[in-house]
Amino acid sequence: METKSFKNWWFLAFNGIFSIFFGLILIIFGKELILSIVIYLGFAIAVVGLIFLLIAIRQIKKDKRAGPMILLSIFSLAIGLGIMIFRDTTMNLFFILIGVWAVIVGIFQLVVLVNIKRNLSNKNIILFNGLLTIVLGIVMFFNPTGFLVFLQKLIGVLAVLLGIVMIYLSFILRKVSMSSSEDPNDLPPAR
């Protein structure tokens, strides 16, 4: 079983190449790619709302209760269409809300740190994490698009690095596969 998994080293190499390709796309393309993704997300939500509406109509025909399903379908359709039509505003609003949430979480972490009575060795980590969360929240609140582009580039760089590591590991697995496929009788006797 172990030998068989080593022989599939090419699968890991292929995934590494795909990861590098994905990372380069994120690094090279900017806001346009993000807006395209937002449009597809809005389309997917609208399709789900349409499916919910069809299910609600089917339930009404069977004389079953469909009120919550109709509300969910209308809500999903409205959100999906809103995202597709107002994609810049939707994206900015989303990151502004995340920024507010991050500031609240960071403040909460600092309050917890101040109220800890015991002497912990991790207090500096909690302090750093709380302050970093507040700073990232403020950046998202005041510059949501800039933060999104930064995050996109960071994920792209990480994907490229992950791809390189996967290709390196695939060559290691290839060597293991080649050495395990050798006939043990051909090896010189151990002394």
Image (spheres, rainbow, N blue to C red):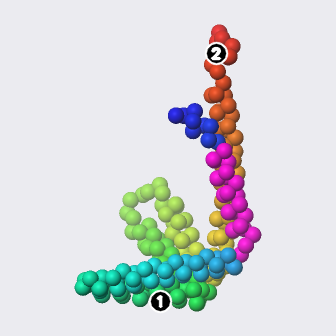
Q: Is residue 26 magenta?
A: yes
Q: Is residue 186 visible?
A: yes
Q: Is residue 42 magenta?
A: no
For image coordinates 39% across by 64% down, the residue present is: 116
Task: Where is residue 57? Give x, y as percent.
Answer: 35, 86
Residue extending furthest front? 61
**Residue 159: horizontal and vertical position, in percent?**
66, 59
User: To which residue does mark 2 refer?
Assistant: 185
Chain part drawn in magenta: 10-30
Of the pair 111 and 160, the residue shown nearer to us? 160
Between the C-alphas of marks 2 and 1, the distance is 71 Å
- Tell me the amino acid under the disc marked 2: Asn
Q: Which residue is mark 1?
A: 78
Dot 1: what SS? Answer: helix
Q: Residue at x 55, y 85 (%)?
A: 83
Residue 119 vertical position relative to residue 107 in the rendered view, above or below: above
Q: Give the class, few, some or many, for how many residues have Cα within 10 Å of label 2's Cα (few <14, many ≥20).
A: few
| Percent coordinates x, y for residue 154 in the rendering | 66, 66
Compared to 184, does 38 lie above or below? below
Q: Using the rendered view, name the quadrant where residue 34 is placed.
A: bottom right
Q: Secondary structure at mark 2?
A: helix
Looking at the picture, tell me which residue is in the foreground, 186 or 31. 186
Give the prevailing secondary structure in the magenta stretch: helix
Q: Amino acid at mark 1?
A: Ala
Residue drawn where x is 63% and y is 28% of the image: 180
Q: Is residue 2 left or right of residue 152?
A: left
First of labels 2, 1 by sequence position: 1
Q: Is residue 180 left or right of residue 112?
A: right
Viewer can see residue 147: no
